[in-house]
Structures are given as C-alpha cells and as structure tokens.
Amino acid sequence: MKERMYRGQQRIAALDPRDRGLAYGDGLFETILVHAGTPVWWDAHWQRLARGCEVLGMALPDPAFVRRQADELATGCARGVLKLSLTRGIGERGYAPPADAVPTLLLDLGAAPAAPPVAGLHLRWCDTRLSIQPRLAGIKHLNRLEQVLARAEWSDPDIHEGLLRDTSGRVVSATAANLFVLREGRWLTPRIDGCGVAGICRAWLLDHVAGADETDLSVAAVETADAVILCNAVRGILPVAALEGRRWAIGTPVRVLLHAMAEAEPAFAHR
C-alpha cells in the first residue's frame, strides 16, 4: 500500500490526535477505482466531494494539487483502489467546528477487491437500520458505524452483502453498494433523500439507462423483482443471484447493463 498525508498542501508523517476526522468523523471520503494508472470517474468523485464539503461547511482543497498527488500514486498501478479521505482538520475539544481549520488530506492506494462470483452475489437482510438524517443524505461522510454494525451481523463466506433499510422500513442500499431492481421492465433504485450514499455508479446508471429512476422500495418490492443488481464505483455492476429464499438467474436485462457499462468504461470490461 502507498499513502500520503497533507495538512493543507504540507506533507505530514502522521495524523494528529486532535484531528476532527478521528475525534468526530468530521470529514468525507471517496473510494476510487484505479485502472491502467488512471483514477476512474475522477470528475464525478470530485463533484461529490465538493458537495460534501459544502454540506459540512469545510474548505475544499485545491483540485489541481489533489489530482496531481492522486495521479502520482496511481502511476504504474494496473488495478487498485485509491481512498481519498478529507477531514476538517485539527481542533480543540468540543463539537463546535473551528473557523480557521486547515483540512487534512489522506490518500492511500491499495489492492483491488477480488472478482465477484460468476454466478452472482448472495445477499441477506440486515437487522441494523440506517438513521434518517436528510442533511447528510447522499454525501460520503466518515461516520460509517451503522455500516460497521450491519456488516458485523454475518460471517458466512457464502453471503456476499447485506441489504439495509432505514428506521421507517424503506429499503436504502447494501452495506457498501447501491441497489437496483428490475420491475415491469424498468430499473429502479431507492431514493437517497433521508440517508444513504448517492453512489457514482448509481448516478451513471440513472443517467445512461432508459427508464431508470428513483423510487421508494419496500422489502416486498425487492423480493418480487424480476432481477436485482448492486453497484459501486470500485466494482461496477454486481448481479445478484439470491436474497435469502429468493433466486434469480443472470438474464438478458442484466447482461445488457454489464455490456453497456463495459463499452462506456473499459475499467469494467469483463476479462
């Protein structure tokens, strides 16, 4: 793994114990696929980071400086994952954000995840519910404790992901991916207006797939769907084969999506 840390644009060797990202989860992150030495969907990731900074009232680093550091880390990497973390910076004790905080930037490049099973993912429902907080909905903030609790619910290696609902019972996403279901010929994904992350791959599908839309989804709507997929910016489209007692074949509608994404972004071409 390769990593770099900065306070503003000054290189640092370690994270300060008073950093608000460590103390309060006061910050944001982006998880970016690196393919053939290039960060994939960089502009979309940066735009979401910028939205997150606006929501949290944090300073956005100089985009040219950050891109230069990311490109240097990614150079020579055939396939990996670049995690960009941005905290508000150092502050004194107390929740009140300091007005003059200098953001802390962390970049680390690691290995790409293993390829998904050819036959599709097996999912379960999680008992942990996501709290509804519209001000934070959509952004990728550092506080992922709900996802940590949900992922701790199972250790069975044959279960690949868990689906999450919010405290009102609406389906939101998987622990580390967005969700789409095929119903009456249309791909539908849960609204991200109360909680959850507005994923980069999710946005691509909404923009490029005819009829794709956001809606409220119940447990029954997922379990009775004609097909189910997960997606995220690192792994692309992930066909789902099973959700507890329900089974799906990987049919033509899913294969059409896989082909369309591979055509648009070579990083997701099946090899």
Image (cartoon, rainbow, N blue to C red):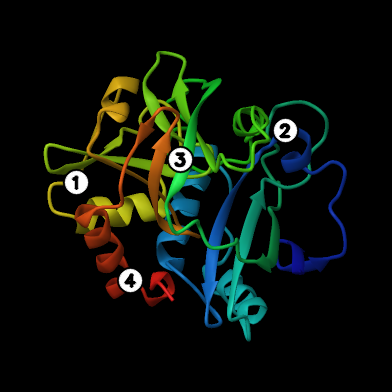
Of the residues tagged 4 and 2, which is closer to the observer? 4
If you read the primary sequence from the N terminus, does the residue marked by circle 4 or circle 2 appear first?
2
Task: Give above or below for 77 relative to 6.
Answer: below
Residue at the spot 67% in from the left edge and 67% down from the top edge = 111
Say left or right for 104 vs 116. right
Kind of residue at disc 3: Val
Residue 200 image-quadrant placement: bottom left
Kind of residue at disc 4: Ala
Pointers 3 and 1 in contact (CB under 8 A)? no
In whole angstroms, how far apart are the C-alphas of marks 3 and 4? 23 Å
Q: What element carries label 1?
A: loop
Of the residues tagged 2 and 1, which is closer to the observer? 1
Residue at the spot 40% in from the left edge and 72% down from the top edge = 270
In whole angstroms, how far apart are the C-alphas of marks 3 and 2? 19 Å
Say left or right for 62 vs 120. right
Q: In which quarter of the image is the C terminus?
A: bottom left
Task: Give above or below for 14 relative to 169.
Answer: below
If you read the primary sequence from the N terminus, does the residue marked by circle 3 or circle 1 appear first?
3
Label 1 packing within 10 angstroms: few (<14), some (14-19), many (20+): some
In whole angstroms, how far apart are the C-alphas of marks 3 and 1? 18 Å
Question: On the image, numbered disc 3 is attached to which residue?
Answer: 197
Camera-side residue of 180 and 206: 180
Pointers 2 and 1 in contact (CB under 8 A)? no
Pointers 3 and 2 in contact (CB under 8 A)? no
Q: What element carries label 3?
A: loop
Q: Residue 24 shows which numbered tag?
A: 2
If you read the primary sequence from the N terminus, does the residue marked by circle 2 or circle 1 appear first?
2
Question: On the image, numbered disc 1 is attached to which residue?
Answer: 212
Label 2 packing within 10 angstroms: few (<14), some (14-19), many (20+): some
Of the residues tagged 3 and 2, which is closer to the observer? 3
In whole angstroms, how far apart are the C-alphas of marks 1 and 4? 18 Å
